[in-house]
Image: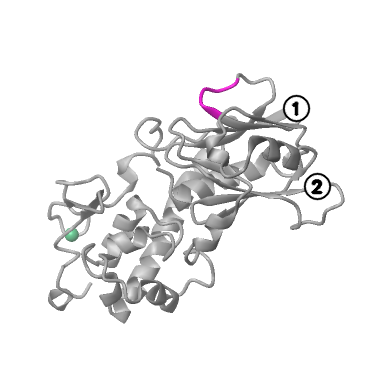
Amino acid sequence: MPELPEVEWVVRSLNRTLPGKTVRDVTVLRPRPLRPTAPDLLRTTLTGATTQPVERRGKFMIFRFTQPGTKKGQGPLVCAHLGMTGRMDVVPNDAPIPKHLVVSLDLGRERFDFVDPRGFGRFSLDATPLDRLGPEPLSDAFTPPVLAEAMKGSKQAIKVSLLDQSRLAGVGNIYASESLFLAGIHPKRPAGGLREPELVRLHAAIQTILNEAIASGSHETADPSNPLFYYGEDGASGSNSGAQRFRVYDHAGEPCPRCGKPIERLVQAARSTFFCAGCQPLRPAAAKRR
Ligand SMILES: [Zn+2]
């Protein structure tokens, strides 16, 4: 499932080709990801509009458009999400229609396709999900006190709280495990009980992990002849995909890269968590200085 870095790759890839194109027509093959927007409304709203650079907010993508006569920033916007396995791409207009196509924008010589095999994605004029998002972890405004405020009062395990997009936007299952490992914090610690030095470490770890992941995808996006993105087990290819670029995620039973103890797996809120009991003690008083 794409998290912040994977969405960032897609945004950067789209922004090489998408901005400045006029939408000639809109074809909707699956209406569900448009909800609550009706397909006809999407079509009449976007036809004739010009595409602006795509923005990312957490795991959401914001497609902005200008209509003739509207100023930048005042046109319609589409609030989109890749869901579990969604893909977005600009292809030649005569390219074959892919399976599981949700919506396609006719851009003249090119075409924007949103393909969503599992159907959990989103491409809607309704932007209200953005209002519920917590702070943006790679923004200048995200500081250790902002992280502390986001976790304040939470009795949930920190791993579970990190996945709550209303507390912090963009971090998902993989990078939550990775960040907690880098910060040396046990995933079961109550989120609201972290001490200040731990919050400082976790804040730095989240930014490091997300920036590393974005950088690891950059070579893949650098090839304009291969603009399609695949992630997850099905399409794993290249050195940046699959488990080898993770420190603990999906490495249960293998030696911890820091201390050599076997990495453990536990299930929290029906999701797998990977951690090292040696480097991430449950009782912080027993923690060794890192
Ligand atoms: Zn360890």
In the image shown, does 180 or 288 lie closer to the viewer?
Answer: 180
Inspect this view and state whether residue 53 appears: no
Which residue is pictured at 30% across the width and 60% down the height?
Answer: 160
Labels 2 and 1: the sequence-earlier one? 2
Position of 147 with respect to 74 (left or right) is left
Q: Amino acid at mark 1?
A: Arg
Asked if residue 49 lies in the magenta stretch, the reply is: no
Label 2: element kind:
loop
Q: Position of residue 263 (x, y in %)?
A: 17, 52
Residue 149, quarter of the rendered image: bottom left
Q: Position of residue 94 (x, y in %)?
A: 68, 20
Position of 42 with respect to 135 (left or right) is right
Of the two numbered discs 2 and 1 in the rendering, the one whose residue sits closer to the viewer: 2
Assess disc 2: are there few (<14), some (14-19) or many (≥20) residues with their C-alpha within 10 Å of its C-alpha. Answer: some
**Quadrant of the snapshot with the C terminus:** bottom left
Dominant secondary structure of the residues highlighted in magenta in the image: loop
**Quadrant of the snapshot with the N terminus:** top left
Which residue bears the numbered disc 1? 109
Label 1: element kind:
loop
Position of 3 with respect to 51 (left or right) is left
236 over 260 or under it: above or below: above
> Magenta span covers which residues?
97-101
Q: Whereabouts is ligand 1, in terms of quadrant? A: bottom left
Asked if residue 100 lies in the magenta stretch, the reply is: yes
Which residue is pictured at 53% across the width and 42% down the height?
Answer: 122
Which residue bears the numbered disc 2? 67
Assess disc 1: are there few (<14), some (14-19) or many (≥20) residues with their C-alpha within 10 Å of its C-alpha. Answer: few
Q: Position of residue 114 (x, y in %)?
A: 57, 34
Would the CB of label 2 be found within 8 Å of ligand 1?
A: no
Q: Which of the numbered marks, if any, corresponds to residue 20?
A: none
